[in-house]
Image (spheres, rainbow, N blue to C red):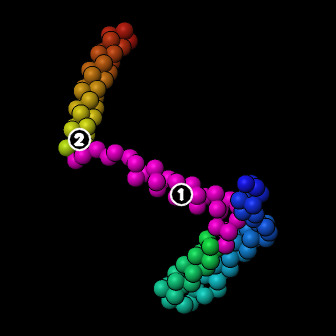
Amino acid sequence: MNTKAEAKEYRLDPLKWLLVFGLIAVGVVGNSHFSAEPLLYRVLGLLVVAALAVLVSLQTAKGAALWRLMRESMVELRKVVWPSRQETNQTTLIVIAVVVVMSIILWLLDTFFGWVASLIIG
């Protein structure tokens, strides 16, 4: 098989990125220009512009790679064995117990060294 036929070619990527940055600039300037309009309309307009910018950026090589990474991450996330509620509670209690014990030990050490320092200093 020809690897060149399998690989998708991304043409005009710099122009697509320029369009993405242009859309972002239009969103920022438009939001400022239409500041007298209700917030709901400005937010909806910004969401539309952001969606267009994302769609254009996904047509670039970097955007396609990011989308592929996100899909593969979701596949890996489904493979994770999550702890049960009981395991989570037990682990949390162990962490809390260790923190309390270490706090007491450090407090005792601080008190001891403070007492030694006060004996030395006088």
Image location (x, y in percent) of residue 36: 56, 90
Residue 80: percent from the left, percent from the top? Answer: 38, 46
- Image quadrant containing the N terminus: bottom right
Q: Secondary structure at mark 1?
A: helix
Which residue is denoted by mark 1 in the rendering? 70
Q: Give the distance between the C-alpha atoms of the residues marked 1 and 2, in whole angstroms.
A: 29 Å
Disc 1 + disc 2, Cβ < 8 Å: no
Q: Residue at x 67, y 72 (%)?
A: 56
Image x and y of residue 33, in percent: 64, 86
- Identify the magenta region: 56-85
The one of 49 and 60 positioned closer to us in this rendering:
60
Q: Main secondary structure of the magenta part?
A: helix
Amino acid tagged 2: Glu
- Residue name at image x 53 percent, y 57 percent: 70
Lateral position of residue 51 relative to residue 91, left or right = right
* Residue 33, magenta (yes or no): no
Task: Indicate left or right for 61 with 36 as reference.
Answer: right
Of residues 71 and 7, the one drawn nearer to the viewer in this rendering: 7
Q: Magenta stretch: residue 68 in it?
A: yes
**Residue furthest bottom as drawn:** 37
Tag 2's secondary structure?
helix
Q: Is residue 25 visible?
A: no
From the image, tell me which residue sits under label 2: 87
121, above or below 70, in the image: above
Q: Is residue 35 left or right of residue 77?
A: right
Which amino acid type is shown beneath numbered disc 1? Met
Residue 85 rendering spot, x and y as whole percentages: 22, 47
Badge 2, how many Cα within 10 Å: few under 14, some, many 20+? Answer: few
Depth check: give the residue in front, 36 or 93.
Answer: 93
Which quadrant, please, contains the C terminus? top left
Q: Tell which residue pokes out farthest to the front in this image.
A: 1
